[in-house]
Image: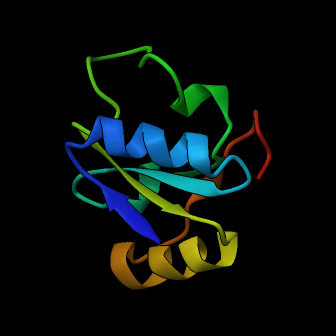
Amino acid sequence: MQKFIDNDQGYLNWVVSSPDGYVVNIIRSLNPNNAVIHRADCWTINGVPARGKAWTDDYVKICSASIEELESWMGKMAGGKAKKCKLCKP
């Protein structure tokens, strides 16, 4: 599992090298109410950010090859569950 904060290049490199992986997209405060789990290849968390200038500025990316590992992290570190992306359906 890897955590990316203020490191867009590292995050984008991980996504490219781990297309079968998963990403929790969560605001820096780790509020579980806005957390979403995506497939690493989801278009909504790749390429050029639709809003803002960076992927890992206001939001933290927690990345893993295991969705179960991310769900466990959500419970321990963020105190809740992440929603699943309705577009990529992880």
Q: Is residue 12 left or right of residue 38?
A: left
How far from the left and from the top, in percent, is residue 63?
Answer: 50, 60
Name which residue lies at 44% across and 48% down.
34
Q: Residue furthest right?
A: 89
How far from the left and from the top, in percent, is residue 59?
Answer: 31, 43
Q: Is residue 22 above or below residue 47?
A: below
Q: Is residue 13 left or right of residue 83?
A: left
Q: Is residue 44 left or right of residue 53?
A: right
How far from the left and from the top, in percent, is residue 37?
Answer: 60, 53
Residue 52 found in image quarter: top left
Q: Is residue 16 above or below residue 68?
A: above
Name which residue lies at 59% across and 48% down.
17
For the rendered model, the colour scheme is rainbow
Residue 86 found in image quarter: top right
Of residues 9 and 88, the one nearer the viewer is 9
Of residues 80 and 40, the one nearer the viewer is 40
Name which residue lies at 67% across and 34% down.
42
Q: Is residue 67 above or below residue 89?
A: below
How far from the left and from the top, in percent, is residue 36?
Answer: 55, 50
Q: Is residue 24 left or right of residue 28?
A: right
Labels in figure, total: 0
Name which residue lies at 68% across and 43% down.
85
Of residues 75 and 57, the one nearer the viewer is 57
Q: Is residue 69 above or below residue 19?
A: below
